[in-house]
């Protein structure tokens, strides 16, 4: 007997083998609503930034799941701010119920745009992140205060664009990665992070932000005071401008890896305050 074919909302039939897998998916996955005495628990969506991937949230994810929260950590494309924001909106469209959005580094700019007009987003949490206003780019915000040494450690390289043109993306040289990005992460773990880092298109860091969701949605911010990517003074200034509830911690830019308990506490503070 052949598995029943299922149809996507686009009107395309799934292959039988994929349809069987989808049909067998258990209920109560990350997009399913969890509840407690306060009502539906928010799904916590974690968005990584440049030179990282979703595994950087692993310690935070384990803690949030132990606390009973549904969690998603999608892969941020890192190709352009508008495109990345649109991608995240697509991820959010598949989530049932309330959402708390968390962004690290460049991911902060992405969540700021993706949450605009989405009444299900109850809080924004910025982890060593950019909090741009309309018309600002990540690159110019990083340069607003002295202290970033990122420019001395990145290597530009070309990649093909869909239209046949060529774009430029940045990676941190592996020899400099720990010192620049993850100084408080064990050397062996930092080496893995360096090898698996996701390049960011220069266009993403230069693109101007649209409307800022932090103007209408309550926000929390964690400032990493030993950050060498985004100057701590810039993180502090952006958080204060946004009216965020601010926590500071002595940590590198990779604070989600080195201090996941602190990151989790800030997220849970946001969750409790908005329920």
Image (tube, rainbow, N blue to C red):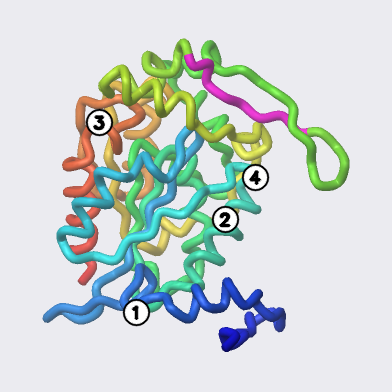
The residue identified by callout 2 is: 85
Is there CB contact under 8 Å for labels 3 and 4?
Answer: no
Per the model, the C-alpha gap separating discs 2 and 3 is: 27 Å
SS for tag 4? loop
Question: Which residue appears at 31% of the width and 76% of the height?
Answer: 28
Q: Quadrant of residue 128?
A: top left
Q: Count residues near mark 1 (Cα–Cα under 10 Å), then give few for <14, some for 14-19, many for 20+.
A: few
Task: From the viewer's side, name the closer residue of 42 and 14.
Answer: 14
Q: Count residues near mark 2 (Cα–Cα under 10 Å), then give few for <14, some for 14-19, many for 20+.
A: many
Q: Could you tell which of marks 3 and 4 lies nearer the N-terminus?
A: 4
The residue identified by callout 1 is: 27
Tell us which disc is closer to us: 1 or 3: 1
Residue 237 spot, x, y in % from top left: 36, 35
Identity of the residue furthest to the right in this view: 164
Residue 210 spot, x, y in % from top left: 59, 53
Label disc, if present, on residue 258 of the rendered structure? 3
Tell us which disc is closer to us: 4 or 1: 1
Q: Quadrant of residue 99?
A: bottom left
Q: Could you tell which of marks 1 and 3 lies nearer the N-terminus?
A: 1
Label disc, if present, on residue 80 of the rendered structure? 4
Question: Which residue appears at 16% of the width and 58% of the height?
Answer: 66
- The segment highlighted magenta reads 167-174
Magenta segment, prevailing SS (helix, strand or loop):
strand
Quarter occupied by the N terminus? bottom right
Is there CB contact under 8 Å for labels 1 and 3?
Answer: no
Per the model, the C-alpha gap separating discs 3 and 4 is: 28 Å
Is there CB contact under 8 Å for labels 4 and 1?
Answer: no
Is there CB contact under 8 Å for labels 2 and 3?
Answer: no
Tell us which disc is closer to us: 2 or 3: 3
Task: From the viewer's side, name the closer residue of 271 and 26.
Answer: 26
Per the model, the C-alpha gap separating discs 4 and 2 is: 8 Å
103 to 198, vertically: above or below: below
């Amino acid at each position: 007997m052949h598995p029943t074919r299922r149809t996507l909302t686009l009107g395309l039939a799934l292959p039988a083998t994929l349809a069987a897998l989808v049909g067998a998916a258990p209920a109560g996955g990350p997009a399913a609503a969890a509840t407690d005495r306060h009502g539906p628990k928010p799904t916590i969506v974690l968005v990584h930034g440049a030179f990282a991937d979703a595994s950087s949230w692993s310690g935070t994810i384990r803690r949030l799941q132990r606390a009973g929260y549904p969690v998603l950590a999608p892969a941020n494309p890192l190709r352009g701010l508008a495109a990345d924001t649109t991608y995240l909106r697509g991820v959010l469209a598949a989530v049932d119920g309330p959402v708390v959005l968390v962004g690290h580094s460049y991911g902060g700019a992405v969540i700021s745009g993706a949450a605009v007009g989405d009444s299900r987003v109850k809080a924004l949490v910025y982890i060593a992140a950019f909090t741009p206003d309309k018309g600002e780019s990540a690159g110019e915000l990083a340069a607003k205060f002295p202290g970033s040494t990122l420019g001395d450690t990145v290597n530009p390289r070309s990649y093909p664009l869909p239209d046949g043109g060529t774009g430029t993306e940045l990676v941190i040289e592996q020899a400099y990665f720990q010192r620049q990005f993850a100084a408080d992460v064990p050397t062996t773990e930092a080496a893995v992070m360096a090898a698996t880092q996701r390049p960011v298109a220069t266009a993403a860091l230069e693109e101007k932000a649209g409307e800022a969701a932090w103007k209408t949605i309550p926000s929390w911010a964690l400032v990493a005071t030993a950050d060498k990517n985004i100057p701590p003074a810039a993180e502090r200034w952006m958080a204060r401008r946004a009216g965020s509830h601010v926590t500071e911690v002595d940590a590198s830019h990779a604070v989600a890896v080195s201090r996941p308990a602190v990151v989790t506490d800030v997220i849970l503070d946001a969750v409790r305050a908005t329920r």
